[in-house]
Amino acid sequence: MSNKTGTRIFELQKFRDQVHVFRDRAFAGKVLADMLKEFRNRNAIVMAIPAGGVAVGAVIAKELNLPLDVAVVSKITLPWNSEAGYGAVAFDGTVKLNQEFLSHLNLNEKEIQQGIEKTTQKINRRVKMFRGNRPLPNFSQNTIILADDGLASGFTLLVAIEALRKAGCQHIILAVPTAHQESIRRIMGKVEAIYCPNLRGGLSFAVADAYEHWRDLDEEEVKKILADFNADSKKD
């Protein structure tokens, strides 16, 4: 992929345009950890995006002996379709609307504001659930490895990156098992490097197609992954 933005891109050619290349999210995390091995025991923090990104990020953090935290961000979904989003809200209250997409919708200002408010409430609840009252890490002194389980449109991720920059992040590395190449282009210039073993093109793209076993993770599963990681870290 041509790149004049200064963002370094790392992929695995054997996985290019392939589907079902990962057994599950944990396997994908191990593939990424191997690609990121230069960060082992470095001044870096893995920030995982709930829900599915936590399953990937926990493995990366464990394999590289790095701290794990969460970057809570969520798309603002349509009233009639919970899978489609017209914007996103991040953990710090950053709100970004997809104006191009909104121009094709018949949503009035009240409906948009209700969507933002509903998503903000979800974000606040998840921050408390997953992070408690802990202060945010010292972002300025660490490289941030931002992990998710896949990149479809990339809009929600851009909001997460914006929030992390506002919080003082100087160096952000994106780690995603799979992504559409057009979405990767949208991220170029926003982060210092992108690690994505399974880059795909084509007219259609689904994150789930990269996995043999795929299902959505609920909040209780995310809490358990985080609790298990913290318990293992204390043992070490």
Image: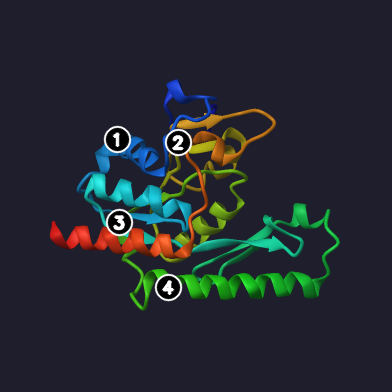
Above or below for 167 versus 232 = below
Q: Disc 4 and disc 3: Cα gap in Å?
A: 24 Å
* Residue occupied by mark 1: 34
**Residue 25 visible in the current orientation:** yes
The first of marks 2 and 3 along the sequence is 3
Q: Residue furthest left?
A: 236
Answer whether labels 1 and 3 touch (C-beta < 8 Å): no
Does dot 1 land on a helix, a strand or a loop? helix
Ranked by sequence position, the earlier of labels 1 and 4 is 1
Judge whether residue 5 can be spotted in this image. Answer: no
Is residue 21 or residue 12 the one in the foreground?
Answer: 21
Measure the C-alpha gap from mark 2 to mark 4.
29 Å
The amino acid on which the numbered mark 4 sits, given as a three-letter code, is Met
What x and y, as percent, mark residue 13?
A: 44, 22
- Give the quadrant of residue 176: top left
In this picture the colour scheme is rainbow
Give the secondary structure at mark 4.
helix
Disc 3, SS: loop
Check disc 2 and report the residue beneath it: 196
Q: Label 3 sits on what residue type?
A: Asn
